[in-house]
């Protein structure tokens, strides 16, 4: 039985000592706008060399800083010339230059390294050389982790997809001794706060000898299990998406599909479609929204294969996917103590609905910002305990429900409230292009990267130091011998109307 979560009933004990502002937010369900670490990607790849050491720099014809809504690119470095020798210093410097270009453009990358790019050339590097190359890359990956969304395992097989290979066993194998070594080297050299995505989910289960998907308790714990995700580069194709959902006994195993559906609540998933048959594209294109929703897709290549992506565009599905891919946080309503004391506390209760197909996955701080208005020039930023990685997708509702400490030296006067979700890295934290925008009308401030909460609070020495208890689930009593109130339903919204005219909305 569902619990009734009613703010009025939950806070009756505090009504006589405090006032609160209740704000209802208007959702924006259709606008396509930029948000970091999600959406369509463009693939950039190049056989790097001393003479041509960059990939991103060679592909500046894309309107990255403009209105194309892209915040991710897939960048593939082909080390074909260095299968059995060190990566030249010029190429390592070129990698740093590429990452700075991404930073300047306000976007991030899905990053992969490979040695071959055709089915006919299966000669990749030995595990010893992969280890050496990862050791060379380690400081450069760490220095540029701020603009790396995820790292795809790469290195093995053509295009780094762990299939057509010389040094890593039978093409249909998921795991063997050499593949196990490469995974070990990846975890020794990839920054610990970045996920590593593998082409097939069975690689993870066989490597860990664990077929149980991640649980909420295991997620985000910096273990190998918590950091291993998958990428599907055969989205919607036959044979279980070209082996993506294959087990050792079944080309399209429902148990593997369920594993991925559960896992991807806590580890990223994305990729591209590779359907090149027009007849098959016509059969499968319409499955994309339900499949992306079920398997929690955050990113998808937009250029390959065009048989499917073009059909998405002609049918209108392309924009639907663009709206919902990754996270889409919609503020529903909020309740805020409207008068607070310097050094006192403020209650903040906000309901957030994630209308995207996925949560956000990389750690991201959440701040409440008080910005002075009128004669007040002061501004205060207070970190919340909220973790947006836990705001689950497909319409699930989560709460920010906290008592915030007001600075002791807070200047008296009026303040506007904002919700700020910047990147965790200081290098880009103050760049609004890397801040999360909520899907609401009249909320986003593009110049600051703040989400307006449309609420003014007063800091006053005369305000109570403690505004009372926060809401807790399950309290339904809305009557008191001191306060008279009435249950009201208008336009599907349930609220409590107090005898003095105040409204307290039930959440």
Image (cartoon, rainbow, N blue to C red):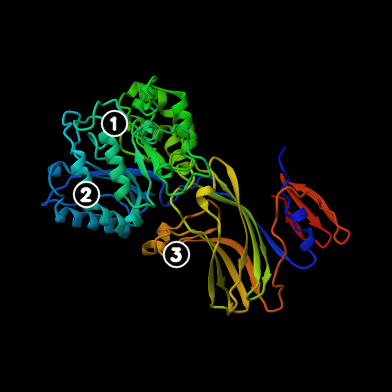
Residue, far top: 249
Q: Residue at x 35, y 57 (%)?
A: 146
Disc on res. 447? 3
Residue 400 location, quadrant: bottom right
Q: Describe residue 15's horizontal placement relative to residue 303 as left or right.
A: right
The number of callouts visible is 3
Q: Nearer the viewer, mark 3 or mark 2?
A: 2
Q: Is residue 210 toward the left or the right of residue 61 in the image?
A: right
How far from the left and from the top, in percent, is residue 506? 72, 50
The first of marks 3 and 2 along the sequence is 2
Q: Earlier in the sequence, mark 2 or mark 1?
A: 2
**Residue matched to label 2:** 55
Distance from label 2 to label 1 (Cα)? 32 Å
Residue that appears at 18% across and 38% down: 126
Label 3 SS: loop
Residue nearest the observer in this picture, 50 or 168: 168
Which is more toward the observer, 281 or 155?
155
Up the image or down, 427 lies above or below 3; here it is below
Q: Say above or below: 170 vs 272.
A: above
Task: Answer whether residue 155 is visible to the viewer in this image.
Answer: yes
Q: Looking at the picture, does residue 315 appear above or below residue 193?
A: above
Residue 452 picture location, percent across and down: 55, 61
Where is mark 1, residue-wise?
176
Which is nearer the eye, 374 or 263?
263
């Amino acid at each position: 039985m569902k619990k009734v979560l009613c703010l009025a009933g939950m806070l009756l004990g505090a009504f006589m000592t405090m006032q609160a502002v209740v704000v209802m937010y208007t959702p924006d369900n259709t606008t396509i706008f930029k948000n970091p670490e999600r959406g369509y990607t463009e693939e950039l790849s190049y056989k790097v060399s001393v003479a041509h050491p960059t990939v991103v720099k060679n592909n500046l014809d894309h309107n990255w800083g403009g209105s194309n809504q892209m915040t991710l690119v897939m960048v593939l470095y082909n080390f074909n010339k260095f299968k059995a020798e060190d990566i030249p210093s010029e190429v390592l410097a070129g990698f740093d230059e590429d990452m700075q270009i991404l930073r300047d453009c306000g976007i991030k990358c899905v990053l992969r390294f490979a040695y071959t790019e055709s089915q006919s050339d299966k000669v990749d590097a030995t595990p010893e050389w992969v280890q050496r190359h990862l050791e060379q890359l380690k400081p450069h990956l760490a220095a540029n982790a701020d603009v790396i969304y995820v790292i795809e395992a790469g290195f093995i097989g053509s295009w780094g997809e762990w299939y057509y290979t010389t040094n890593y066993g039978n093409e249909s194998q998921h795991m063997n001794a050499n593949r196990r070594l490469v995974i070990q080297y990846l975890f020794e050299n990839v920054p610990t706060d970045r996920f590593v995505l593998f082409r097939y989910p069975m690689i993870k289960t066989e490597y860990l000898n664990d077929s149980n998907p991640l649980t909420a308790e295991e997620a985000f714990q910096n273990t190998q299990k918590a950091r291993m995700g998958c990428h599907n580069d055969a989205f919607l194709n036959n044979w279980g998406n070209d082996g993506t959902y294959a087990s050792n006994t079944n080309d399209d195993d429902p148990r593997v599909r369920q594993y991925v559906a559960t896992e991807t609540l806590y580890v990223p998933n994305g990729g591209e479609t590779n359907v090149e048959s027009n007849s098959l594209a016509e059969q499968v294109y319409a499955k994309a929204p339900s499949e992306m929703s079920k398997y929690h897709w955050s990113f998808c290549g937009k250029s390959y294969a065009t048989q499917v992506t073009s059909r998405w565009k002609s049918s209108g599905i392309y924009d639907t996917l663009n709206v919902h891919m990754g996270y889409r946080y919609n503020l529903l309503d909020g309740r805020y103590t409207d008068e607070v004391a310097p050094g006192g506390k403020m209650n903040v209760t906000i309901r957030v609905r994630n209308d995207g197909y996925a949560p956000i996955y990389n750690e991201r701080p959440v701040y409440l910002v008080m910005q002075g208005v009128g004669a007040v020039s002061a501004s205060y930023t207070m970190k919340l305990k909220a973790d947006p990685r836990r705001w689950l997708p497909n319409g699930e509702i989560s709460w920010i429900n906290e008592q915030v400490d007001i600075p002791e030296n807070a200047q008296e006067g009026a303040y506007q409230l904002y919700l700020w979700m910047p990147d965790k890295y200081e290098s880009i934290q103050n760049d609004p292009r890397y801040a999360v925008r909520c899907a609401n009308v009249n909320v986003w401030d593009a110049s600051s990267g703040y989400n307006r909460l449309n609420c003014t609070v007063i800091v006053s020495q005369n305000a109570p130091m403690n505004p009372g208890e926060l809401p807790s689930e399950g309290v339904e009593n809305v009557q008191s011998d001191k306060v008279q109130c009435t249950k009201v339903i208008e336009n599907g919204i349930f609220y409590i109307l107090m005898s003095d005219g105040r409204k307290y909305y039930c959440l």
